[in-house]
Image (tube, rainbow, N blue to C red):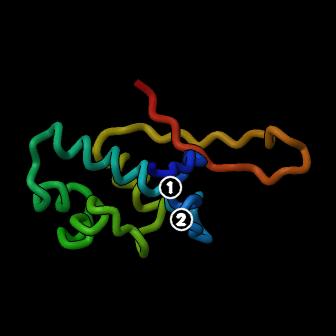
Amino acid sequence: MTDFEESSGNVYADLGYQDADEMLVKAQLATKIGEIIKARKWTQQQAAEVLGVPQPKLSKMLRGQFRGISEAKMLDCLARLGRDIKIVVGPAQHRLAAGRVAVVFAA
């Protein structure tokens, strides 16, 4: 019999990464960037030119190797792909807990 452990919802936290929340946000942003590129049937070179990043860096980002790429740059990429970006700052759900960062994609 195989034992299973239920995920916390953040694979990076489950694996013990110190920057798990940041990594999850970057993964979600990179996934959306990749989806848009694929839907437009662009090559990575075409996308890299629009996004203003070198093609090898774009390739790494789309394969989940996004250390060294800031969240701000990823948001800029989404804006260059025609997406509006909204940053909403609100109170933490629990008064004594630290706030959290979440990515929500509108339909």
The amino acid at mark 1 is Val
Q: From this viewpoint, which residue is outermost toward the right?
A: 96
Q: Report whether residue 22 is seen.
A: no
The amino acid at mark 2 is Leu
Q: Mark 1 points at which residue?
A: 11
Q: Report whether residue 41 is seen.
A: yes
- Identify the element where label 1 is drawn: helix
Looking at the image, is 56 positioned above or below residue 64? Answer: below
Q: Name the residue under label 2.
A: 15
Q: Where the C terminus falls, by quadrant?
A: top left
Q: Which of 21 and 81 is in front in this view?
A: 21
Q: Residue at x 45, y 51 (%)?
A: 2
Residue 25: x and y in percent read: 50, 53
Q: Which of 100 and 6 is in front in this view?
A: 6
Q: Which residue is drawn at 21% across and 55% down?
A: 50
Q: Give neighbour class at mark 2: few <14, some 14-19, many 20+ (Cα, 10 Å).
A: few
Left or right placement of residue 69 versus residue 46 in this view: right
Q: In which quarter of the image is residue 39?
A: top left
Q: How far apart are marks 1 and 2 (CA)?
A: 6 Å
